[in-house]
Image (cartoon, rainbow, N blue to C red):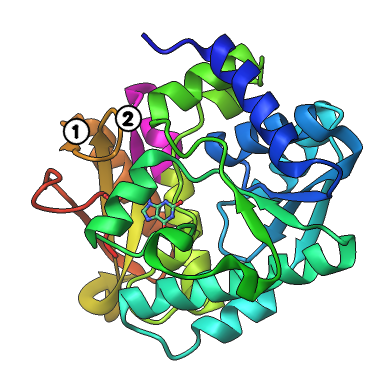
Amino acid sequence: MFDAKDFIKKSLEEIKKEVKNERVISACSGGVDSSVTSILVHKAVGKNSLTVFIDDGLRREGEPEFVVKAFENLGIKIRYVNEKIKFFTALKGKTDAEEKRKAFRHTFYSALGRVAKKQNAKFLAQGTIAADIVETVKGVKTQHNVLDQIGIDPKKYGFDIIEPLRELYKPEVRMVARELELPLEISERMPFPGPALSIRVLGEVTPDKVEISRKATKIVEEETKELKAFQSFAVLHSDKATGTKDGKRVYGNIITVRVVESKDAITAKAMKVPYETLNKIYRRITGEIPTVVRCLVDITDKPPATIEFE
Ligand code: XMP
C-alpha cells in the first residue's frame, strides 16, 4: 500500500541531496502533477526554488489567473511568463500531431531555459509521472515532458532535470496532494495534457481555432461536472461540415465531445453520458460558438483509441 506521508519525507530528502545549494525552477501548469512537484521542491529548498508558469496561450479559460492565485494563496512565489507569441509562431503551419508536439516541447523548454539562465538555476523540476514515461518510451506518443528517457539531453536547454514523481501514477499523486493539504481544486483536478489545446485543435493551430476549442471545452466541462469523469473535453476538427444557420446554408466547424472514465490514463472507457446532457452540450456549443454547425460524440475506448485525438 502506497504511503503518501512516507513518500513526501523521502522525496524531500532526495531533492535536498540532489540540489544542494543550487537554484531550482519548477515548471507549473496548475495540474496536480506539476503543482505537487512545485510544492515538494519549495518545501525541500525554500528560497532556492522559484515556481514558473509559462503562458503558452493554449490553456483553458481562466487557467493562468487560477494558477497564479492558487500559488499566491499557498504563500508560494510564482513567476508568470507570457510566451504566447512564441508558441503560436512555433506551431504555425504544422499539421502533423507529432510535429506539433515536438514544436511545443522545444518552445516550452527553450522558454524555461531562458528563465533558468536569468535565475541562475541549475535545475528544472517537473511533474513527469510514470504513465508519461511508459507511453513515450513505448512510442504511443511523444509526451511533451519526457526528454532524457528518449535520448534528449536536457543540458541542451541549459538545465538538469529533477522529477520527484517519476515513479508514481495519478492516484498516488492525488494521495500526495491530499497529504500536502492542497486545495481540492488542485488535488482532484482533471488531467489536462501538457501541450494543452494545441492537441485539441486538430491540424494547424491558430489563435482563432484555439479560442473555439477553449469555449467548447468550457461548455463540456461545465455540463459534465456532476459525472465525475476522468476527463471531459471538446476537440475542434480541421475539416468542416454543412449546416444551417438563420435559414441559410453554411459551411462550419465540427466539434467532438469526449468524456472518459479511467484510473491511470493507460486504458480508458468512453462514458455513457445521459442523452439530455449531450443534447444540452450540443445546443450550447452551436448556440454560443456561432461558427460550429455540428457536434459529434466519441464512443471509443482506449484501446483502440487514445484519450486525446492527437
Ligand atoms: P492519451 O491521449 O495518450 O493520453 O491516451 C493519456 C493521458 O495523458 C494526457 N496527455 C498528455 N499529458 N503531455 C502531458 O502532460 C502530453 O504530451 C500529453 N498527451 C496526452 C492525456 O490528456 C491523458 O490524460
- Cβ–Cβ below 8 Å for labels 1 and 2? yes
The percent position of residue 87, horizontal first and vertical second, equals 60, 76
How many numbered discs, if any? Answer: 2
- What is the span of residues highlighted in magenta in the rendered image? 220-232
Q: Quadrant of the C terminus?
A: bottom left
Mark 2 vs ligand 1: CB below 8 Å: no
Q: Nearer the viewer, residue 280 or 6?
A: 6
Q: Is residue 42 above or below residue 52?
A: above
Q: Report which quarter residue 265 is drawn in.
A: top left
In the picture provided, is 188 more to the left or to the right than 23?
left
Q: Nearer the viewer, residue 179 or 120?
A: 120
Residue 5 coordinates in the image, percent (x, y)? 58, 10
- Residue 83 seen by the camera: no
Residue 215 position (above or below residue 94): above
Asked if residue 37 is positioned above or below residue 120 in the image, the reply reads above
Q: Which residue is mark 1?
A: 271
